[in-house]
Each structure stands twice: as structure tokens, then as C-alpha cells.
Image (spheres, helix red, strand yellow):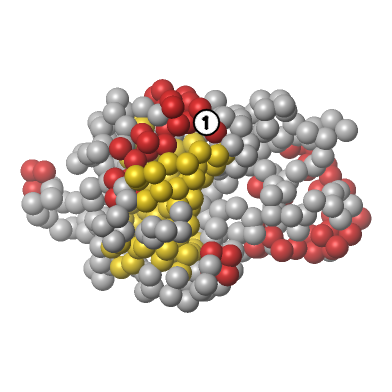
Amino acid sequence: MKAFNTYGYVLIYNLLTALSPCFSSCLPAAQPITSKLDEGWWAYKDVVQESFVPVPSFWGLVNSAWNLCTIGKRQSPIDIETSHLIFDPYLTPLRLNTAGRKMGGTMYNTGKHVSLRPDKAHLVNISGGPLDYSYRLEEVRLHFGSEDSQGSEHLLNGQGFPGEVQLIHYNQDLYANFSEAAKSPHGIAVVSIFIKLSENSNTFLNRMLNRDTITRINYKHDAFLLMGLNIADLYPDTTRYITYEGSITIPPCYETSTWILINKPVYVTQMQMHSLRLLSQNEPYKIFMSMSDNTRPTQPLLQRCIRTNINFSKQGRDCPNNRALRPQYRGNMEDGGEGGVGSKGSSKK
């Protein structure tokens, strides 16, 4: 069987929908397409192999356990229109707790992401901000594009960035582990930081993306141990952020995530971004397919509010020339001032 393209997916969906009005709910039981309805059976883009693997528009149609991917009302990622942000004066700064210790972790090529999973000996927690509980770091995940104009899951005023770092945490006050928290209320908190290109790299990302490290995970299932990491180095020098209630951005798309998008980017070099694009989503004995463009399309905001602690009307010492504060999230190629997401330059690290 030849690899399906997107048009082929549409034909299959239309045919099955016509044959059965309950296609989306009946398919998982009947499994006419595949018996591999497991957690890893999904893709971001068309794949070259001998079986049907659903792309994002099909996630919620091929498995009833994933139906939120299609029918959910609080899905992520979203396109953040800065003109619609609501200033919330009660949003306090986010608190990061590492107990003053560095951490170790294993970096994986999962076939879909570059994933850094910290060891259990050195706990990293966040609290404060929009969070009512303490959340433990479970994974640092990288999304990136095949071109510099795309690669971030979230968009800002319709524009993307070369990449996005997502620090995924679970509620350790209410739940025993990530799996339990992911399907439960207030279960997940994701800190999201946009990636931009610069001559200098963020200290933390440089440890992950330098040539000696990134080449250890060229293929799916490759892993490499890193030690002596300071997660605080990954956070930009700002207390300002944007937050909203959303979902996990991979199946089963549980709507249990509080998103916190930091109002400054982190930086990687053009060479490091090129190295990411050379990572394969397959094993070495299979055809090379770049892991890039590992992003879910943006989802409707619907009735949700997007809050921020950026005070647009306040003037003060943080504002050059006593200007009113403005969101530093701007177009991908524009200057944003103060080292914001839209600005050019290097990171503080």
C-alpha cells in the first residue's frame, strides 16, 4: 500500500462517514483501518510507511479516546491576538523552585520531539502566577519548523516563530504522577517560551543543542544523558507572561492544561536550528524524514479569556522613554523593544 497523502485521508473519511453516521465513535471498536490504536499511533504530517497514520485533523476521528481533539472546546495551541489580552492585576510572578540544585536528565529523540526528561532525584517545581498548586517538571519538549517563519505551536497575531520550548509540569499536590494528572482537573501546567535565532545561544539550550550532544540523538529511540543542568538558565529575564486554559497538544488532547507563555524569547543559533532539522523521526534503517514542523495547528479560542500581567496603560521605569507598556509579542521579524519576543539580539544567558 502506498503512503497516504492528505487528499487520501479526506477520501477515506468522506467514504466512511457516508457509510456510517457514527464513524467517529464506532471506528475504534471496529478498527477497519488499523489495530494499532495505541498512544503513539498518530503523526504531525504525512508519513512514508505502509499503513494509515492520522495527521492532526484526524486525531479525534480514529479513536474515541481522542475525541476531544475534534469536539473539545478548550483546545491548544491557539493564535494569541494581543489586542484581545485582558490585564489581570492579581496575576503574581511565577515561582521556580529547584532547591538550589542542578538537575540531570535524559534527552530523547521520540520520533516526534526532542524531549528532555529530568531524573527523579532532583525535583523542579513551579507555583504562583495563575497556579493554585505546586507543579513538578515532567518534560522539556522542543517544537521547531523547517523554515524560520514556522515551528512554534502558538502563534502571535497570526505569525509563528522558528520554535517553541514547552516545560510540561503535573500537579503534585493532587495527583501521584503525570498520567493521572493529565486526565484530571488542574492537572497540567505548561510554561511556553518562543525560540528565536541569534548569534548567541541560551545557556540551557546550548547544552542540549551543541554538536557533541545533538548528534547523539539523530534517530528515533536514541537517548543521551545530560548532567549539571540549571533549569533557571532556560527562563528569560522577565516576570511578565500570558496565560489561558487549554489542552495538551498531542492525543488524547485532554483539556487539563494551564498555559503560561513567557513574554520574552530564548535564543538559539542558526547552526543549532539546522542541527534540529537534521534529526530523523525514523529509525536509522528507515527513510529519513525530518522531525521539523512537529506542531499541531492552532485551535479556536471560542469563549476563553487570555489573561496577562502586562499592564498596557502603566508607565514606569520598565518602559524606555516612559512609554506605555506594550506586549513584547509582535511579528516574527519586527523589533519589539526591551528584548521582547519580537526583538532582535541575544539572550541574557
Q: Residue at x 56, y 72 (%)?
A: 184
Residue 43: percent from left, percent from top: 67, 43
Residue 320 in view, yes or no: yes
Image quarter for residue 172?
A: bottom left
The kind of residue tagged 1 is: Arg
Residue 3: percent from left, percent from top: 80, 32
- Above or below residue 60? Residue 335 is above
Q: Residue at x 86, y 62 (%)?
A: 29
* Closest to the observer, 3 or 310: 3
* Closest to the observer, 235 or 307: 235
Q: Residue at x 15, y 58 (%)?
A: 314
Please identify the residue farthest to the bottom as the structure is shown: 174
| Residue annotated with mark 1 | 216
* Closest to the observer, 159 or 60: 60
Q: Residue at x 52, y 31 (%)?
A: 216
* Closest to the observer, 110 or 163: 110
Secondary structure under the numbered disc 1 in the rendered image: helix
In the image, is 45 to the left or to the right of 305?
right
In the image, is 4 to the left or to the right of 257?
right
Residue 244 in view, yes or no: no
